């Protein structure tokens, strides 16, 4: 009887064996799919990382964040302003002559009247100090030596005639 039971158990076990194998196979297939999906995701991440690194290497301007923030002096030239503090009287105009950008010693450039005793002239083109003088109506020269403008600053003078 024991043999019969053992044989019966073996038969049942043998019948269950293909079912167990099928279950194991079925259980292992999703694991393979998960593994394949995981491998694909890892490959995509590696590819995306490699592309980002390659584009960063190709684009050197993107690396320095400081270069994208321009310094004020580098972007716009400094403004050099000449201010003459003098009342030249109603109907008269103050002119400037010199060696600066847009100036000459032969012909004067009219200055802007800011108030009854303030006249200005400005330029962004100056790259070095330059001499100048002011004239009333482009005819009467101011007394004394030439004035020298400092680039990028407001230069205030009080001329005498």
Image: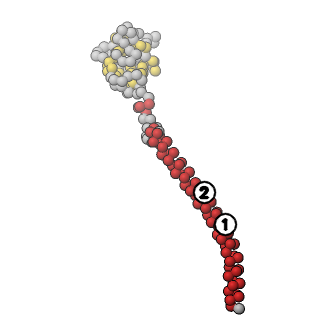
Which residue of the protein is positioned furthest toward the left in this rendering?
A: 145
Q: Can residue 94 be spotted in the picture?
A: no
What residue would you read off at disc 2? 37
> Would residue 155 be found to the left or right of residue 35 on screen?
left
Q: Is label 2 in contact with label 1 (beta carbons under 8 Å)?
A: no
As rendered, which of 14 and 129 lies closer to the eye?
14
Residue 17 image point, x, y percent: 67, 75
Residue 85 figure quarter: top left
Q: Earlier in the sequence, mark 2 or mark 1?
A: 1
What residue do we see at 35% from left, 11% from top? 105
**Mark 2, residues whose alpha carbon is within 10 Å: few (<14), some, or many (≥20)?**
few
What residue do we see at 37% from left, 8% from top? 139
Q: Can residue 145 be spotted in the picture?
A: yes
- Quadrant containing the N terminus in the rendered view: bottom right
Residue 44 image point, x, y percent: 56, 51
- Numbered disc 2: secondary structure: helix
As rendered, which of 88 and 51 lies closer to the eye?
51
What residue do we see at 64% from left, 63% from top? 29
What residue would you read off at disc 1? 26
In the rendered image, the vertical position of residue 84 relative to residue 3, given as above or below: above
Residue 9 figure quarter: bottom right
What residue do we see at 33% from left, 13% from top? 142
């Amino acid at each position: 009887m024991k043999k019969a039971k053992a044989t019966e158990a073996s038969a049942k076990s043998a019948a269950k064996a293909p079912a167990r194998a099928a279950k194991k196979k079925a259980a292992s297939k999703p694991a393979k799919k998960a593994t394949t999906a995981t491998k694909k995701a890892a490959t995509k991440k590696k590819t995306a990382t490699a592309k980002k690194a390659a584009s960063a290497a190709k684009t050197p301007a993107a690396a320095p964040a400081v270069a994208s923030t321009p310094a004020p002096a580098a972007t716009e030239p400094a403004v050099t302003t000449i201010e003459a503090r003098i009342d030249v009287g109603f109907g008269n105009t103050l002119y400037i002559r010199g060696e600066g950008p847009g100036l000459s010693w032969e012909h004067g450039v009219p200055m802007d009247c800011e108030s009854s005793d303030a006249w200005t002239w400005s330029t962004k083109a100056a790259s070095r100090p330059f001499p100048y003088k002011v004239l009333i109506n482009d005819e009467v020269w101011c007394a004394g030596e030439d004035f020298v403008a400092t680039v990028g600053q407001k230069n205030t003078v009080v001329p005498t005639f």
